[in-house]
Image (cartoon, grey):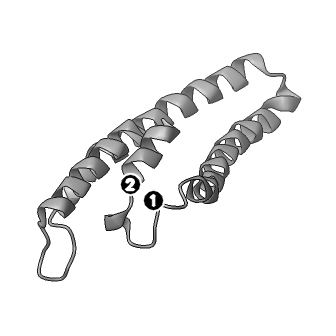
Amino acid sequence: MIAAGLVETVRLRYVHEGKFTESGAVDLNVFWQSFQYILVGASEVFASVGQLEFFYDQAPDSMRSCCSAMALLSLAIGGYSAGLLIPIVNAITRENKWIPKDLNEGRLDLYFYSLA
């Protein structure tokens, strides 16, 4: 999330400098996001391999699938809790919303930093 916050900080700097394309989008290359996806992909690979190795070595045969399901459930709970934080953050930052409808007017970078 720190990488996402840094990219959003750069994007907001472009917004404040008025660097827009003809279509109205911020003139920021999409490859700025590639580092975030590389980090997420690498962390998923390392965590999933480690968890599966642990479950198949340490868990009894009857519990292996249940342990794998619990690992995926923990990922799902993390995603839902991050999604549930959005209305809470919007309620707390009522006057100067971090996540408004127009992201160019918000502070999505602060939301990413708070998730980290």
Q: Is residue 79 left or right of residue 115?
A: right
Quarter-wise, where is residue 103 in the image? bottom left
Viewer-side residue, 92 vs 35: 92
Q: Earlier in the sequence, mark 1 or mark 2?
A: 1
Q: Position of residue 59 (x, y in %)?
A: 79, 21
Q: Confirm or deny contact between disc 1 and disc 2 (CB under 8 A).
A: yes
Residue located 27% across and 48% down the image: 9
Residue plotted at (58% across, 57% down): 86
Q: Amino acid at mark 1?
A: Asn
- The correct choice, above or below, for 80 with respect to 55 in the image is below
Q: Measured from the top left, where is residue 104 in percent x and y?
A: 31, 66
Q: Which residue is mark 2?
A: 107
How far across and how far down the image is residue 93, in percent? 53, 55
Residue type highlighted by circle 2: Arg
* Label 1: how many Cα within 10 Å (few below 14, some 14–19, many 20+): few
Closest to the observer, 17 or 83: 17
**Furthest residue in direction bottom, as rendered:** 23
Label 2, secondary structure: give it: loop
Q: Can the viewer see residue 74 in this picture?
A: yes
User: What residue did someone put label 1 on?
Assistant: 96
| Viewer-side label of 1, 2 | 1
Distance from disc 1 to disc 2, alpha carbons, whole Å, reads 9 Å
Location of residue 73 by image quarter = top right
Q: Is residue 98 left or right of residue 20?
A: right
Give the numbered dot on residue 44.
none
Q: Nearer the viewer, residue 105 or 72?
A: 105
Q: Residue at x 64, y 29 (%)?
A: 52
**Helix, strand, or loop for circle 1?**
loop
In the shown orientation, is residue 81 left or right of residue 103?
right
